Amino acid sequence: MLKLKPKFDLHRDVVSDVLRKEASVCRVEEYSGAVDTRILNIERDGSILFCWKGATGTTRIGKYDPNTKQNKLLYTFDKQVCVSSCSLNKEETLLAVSLAQNTRGEERLKPISKCLTLLIEIQPINNTKVLKAVDCRVKVQFLQSEADRRSILESHLLLLTEDGYVDLYHVLLTRQEGYRVVMAHPDRLSKTAERVVEDFCWVQWDGRTQRLYYLTHNVTHTQGKFLFRCVQFYLSHHCETVLELPLELPANPFPTVKFVNLGFDHFHTERPEKELVRMEVLTNGIERSMCVCYSQPHKDRLELIYTLVLVHKDCSKTFRVSLGSEQQPQKARQLHPLFIPIGYYILVYLQDYFLHCINTRQQEMLCHSLYLSGPDMDLDLQSANMTVLHAEDESSSSLLDLTTGRIHTAELSPAYLLQLLRSDTPSRCPSSKTDPQRLAALHCLLVYMGNDPNLELKIIEWLCDNVNAFESFDQFQEFILATLYRISYEKSLSLDKVLPYSSVFDKKEIPACLLEVPGVLCTTELHIEAVFKGKARGLQGFWSELQWNRERTKYLDAVPNPRYRTSHIQADWDKLRSERRPSSHMNHMEDNTKKVLSMVDTWCLDKKLVPLFQEDDHQQRALIGLTVDKLREHLNRHLPRLGKKKIDSLVVNYVAKLLELIRHMLESVWLKYKLGPCALCFSSTQRGSPGEWSVFHFMFRILEAMRGLCLPLPPGYHTLLALLAVRCLPHHTFLQYIDHGVLQLTETFVSRLMTDLDNSDANERLKFSILKRLPEPMEQRIYHMWDHPVSSASISRDYVRTLLERHNKNKGFAFTGRDKPGFRPEFLPLTYLAKILSDIEEQALNPFEEQENVDARFVEETALKQTLILLGFEEK
C-alpha cells in the first residue's frame, strides 16, 4: 500500500563521516571505537541535528544538510552531556540546547536542576547564556520564517516546559569585527521573554507553517472538557491565537505533558501503554484543510476508537474498529495507530490489525476510503518505533525509525492499488466486500494520482479487461466523473462540493456494501464549534480559504442537492428533443455548443486515430448545449462568489474536457488492439476481428454509461459505433440494436453504407431494412447516393411530383398524392389526372341540388340513352 523510498540513513550519511572526524582528532588512520550517534531534531529546511560522544570524552553536535549531503560540526562540549533538545537558528549563529542533568552518584549531593537550557553563540564559538535551570523537561525551537533574514540580526526562540507554559525569547544580535555575531545584551535576555501559552497538557509544533497547537482545559465546560487552540507566528514573529475548538476527551488523557514534533529526547522514556489518547494535527496548504486526529482504546480493550475532526469540512468522523477476540487484548491496549498524511488522504495504521486510508476530500461515504485488514495491510513498519515527520512536500510523508536512524519517504503505491483493481474475486469472497475496495482504489488512482498519463492508460486497459459493470457500481461512469472532477478541481478548489465525482449518488438505492465496512462503525457529527479569532478573520491565504471552505460547507449542507447530478437534466433533454422547429431556446443551446467545440483540441483532425468531431450530430450538439446551460445555472446558484465570467469559463471547459476524455479513451483502446483504417471499412466477406469486437464492446459500455448519466458524446461517436456494429454483429442483431434505440442511424453512416457496401442479396436486404427505418427527409437524401433501380424509381417519382406541383401551383390544385388510400402513386401522370378529375367533380354544380319530387326512373333511362348514343349503339 505504501511505497517507501530511502531518504536518510544515519549510519551511511553521518556515522561514516563522524568516524573520520574522530580519527583525525585521535591522529589515527582509522578510528575503531564506537560512536553513539543520535538524531536530535529536524529543522524546517530539512537539516538534521545530531550528536555523538567523542573519543576524548566530549559531546559534539553536528548538522547534516540534505541539499549538499554534507555534515558540519556546530559545537563541542568539553565533557559528556545528555542533550535532550536542540535547535539551530536559520542564520546558523545561535544554538539552543537543553541538557538533562545527571543526578546519580556524586552529582546527586549537589543542588542541581534536572534540566539546563543554554543559548550558545557559534559564529564563532564564543559566549554561552543560561536561559533555564528547572526541574522539568524543556524543549527549544527557533522560529524560521520563509523570508531570507540573513541580513537581520535577530532570532526568536520558543521554550516549552513540562510545567505547561511556553515562552518566546527575542534575541537581538550584533556584528563585531566584521564577522563575529554575538548577542547584543545577553544580561537583558530574560526581560525579552514573552509568555505565549499559560497552560497546556499536549503541544505540537508545525515548523512548515510556523504554528503551535496546544490542548488546555476548557474552563467554561459549556461545549467540551478540553479546548484545542492554534497560535500562528507571523513574519514579524509576533503571534496570536487564531483558532479555538472544543474537544471531548477522557479525563487526564496524558499522564505527562506530551510534546509532538519538538525533537527527540533519548533520555526520557515514553510509556505508550499509559497514554489514553494519541493526538496529532495535520494540515495541507494546497487543500486548505486542517484535521485534528486522536485515538483512544475502548474500555473493553477489543476496540479502537479514532476521531478525525475535519475543520475544513465543518464535521468530525469517529470510527470504531473491532480488533477481534483472537488478538491479545493487552497488545491492543499498548498500541496507538500512526496518522500518516499523504496528500488529502490520512492513513490510520495499527500494526498487525488494520490500515484505513481515509479520503478527507470526499468524506461523505465510507466506500471512497480504503479499509484493509489482515494480511492485506502489512506495511512492514514497526509502528512503535516510527515517527511521522511533516515534510515540505505535502504529497508525501517522511517516516523516521529512531531505532535504525533511517528516514523513508512514504507515498501511496499505484502498483498496489492497480493490483486491488485487477484482483479476481474468489468464490469465498463476495463482491460486496471487494467492490468497496475497488471503488476506493479506483478513486485514489484517478483523482489523487490521475496526472500520470501512464497510470491512466493502465486504468483504461483495466476497463477493457472488465467491461461488464460491477454489482454495486459502474466503473465506466466512475472513471468519467472522477477524471473530470480531478481536471476541474485543479482549476478551482471551490468546485469541491458542487461537481459530481461519483455515480453512486445517482443511484435510486445505494447498495448496502457501499454504506458500511465490516468491522468498522462510523458516526458523523456535523457543524463543529470551531471559532476563528484575531487576524485569521481577515488574513489572505490559508486561513481565509479555510474559513471560506467551512462557511461554504455549512451553506451547502443546508440546501437540497448542492452537488450537481447529471441525471437531473433528463426531463429537460426529453423536452428539448421533442421540439421540431427552431426557437430562441434552441439557438441559445447552439451558441453554448459552439463555445464548447471551439475549445476542443481539433488540431489535425484528419490525422487523429479516431474520426470524431468531423460531422454534425444535431442531437449530441443539442445535449452539449443543454449540459452547459444546466451546469452553469447550478454553479451560479451555489457559487456566486466566483462571478459569471469565471463560471462560464469553468463550465465550457468542463464539457470540452468531457468530450476530449471520451476521444482519449477511444484512442487508447484503438492503440491497445492495433486497429487500422480497415476497421472503418465495409466488407461483404470479412467480419470484425476480435480486437474490433473488443473495441465495439468498449464503445457500447461508454454509450451505456453516458446515457445513464445523461451526458453528451462527441459528434461522430454514433457513426463510429454503427460502423463497428455492422462489422461485428449479424445483420438481424444489428437491426434489433437499432429498433431498441441502442444504435443511432446517422446520415454519415447510412450514406457510407449505401455507397461502400456492394449490392449482394444480403446487403440489399440490409439496405432496404435500414431505409424503412429512416425518417422521410433523410430517406430522400439517401436515395440520391445509392446506385440501384429502386432508388432511381424513387428519384423519378419525386422529380415528376415536383414538376407537376410547380406547374399547377397557380391553378389552385394542391397535389397530395398520398393523402387518399384510393390513389396509387406508382404512375404519377395517371394519378395526377385522376386527382384533377376528382377535384373538378367536387367543384361542379349538382343540377339536382335543392330540387324536390325528382323522377328517379326518368333520370336513369335518360342517362342510359345518352350512354348508348356516345358508344355508337344508337343514333341520336
Image (spheres, rainbow, N blue to C red):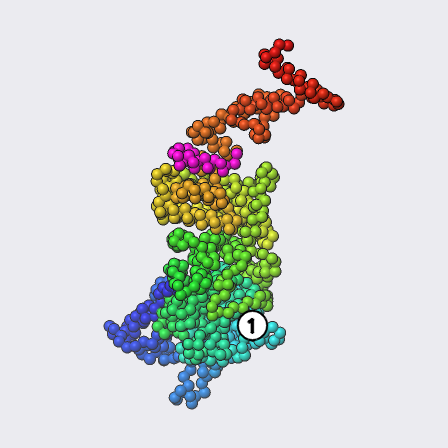
Q: Which residue is mark 1?
A: 247
* Residue 571 seen by the camera: yes
The image shows residue 557, relative to residue 42, as above or below, that is: above
Q: Which residue: 59% across, 54% down?
A: 638
Amino acid type at mark 1? Leu
Asked whether, in this view, residue 460 is left or right of residue 288, the answer is left
Task: From the viewer's side, name the closer residue of 72 and 542.
Answer: 542
* Outermost residue, right side: 852
For the N terminus, the quadrant is bottom left
Q: Position of residue 683 (x, y in %)?
A: 37, 38
The image shows residue 313, relative to residue 387, as above or below, that is: above
Q: Residues within 10 Å of mark 1 (few under 14, many from 20)?
A: many
The image shows residue 426, relative to residue 246, as above or below, that is: above
Task: From the viewer's side, name the closer residue of 857 and 369.
Answer: 857
Q: Secondary structure at mark 1?
A: strand
Q: Which residue: 43% across, 42% down?
A: 732
User: Is residue 468 within the magenta segment?
Assistant: no
The image shows residue 301, relative to residue 761, as above or below, that is: below
* Residue 88 seen by the camera: no
Asked whether, in this view, residue 169 is left or right of residue 380, the answer is right
For the C terminus, the quadrant is top right
Q: Which residues are magenta?
A: 753-776
* Outermost residue, top side: 875
Q: Which residue: 54% across, 42% down?
A: 622
Q: Position of residue 608 (x, y in %)?
A: 40, 42
Q: Which residue: 61% across, 75% down?
A: 221
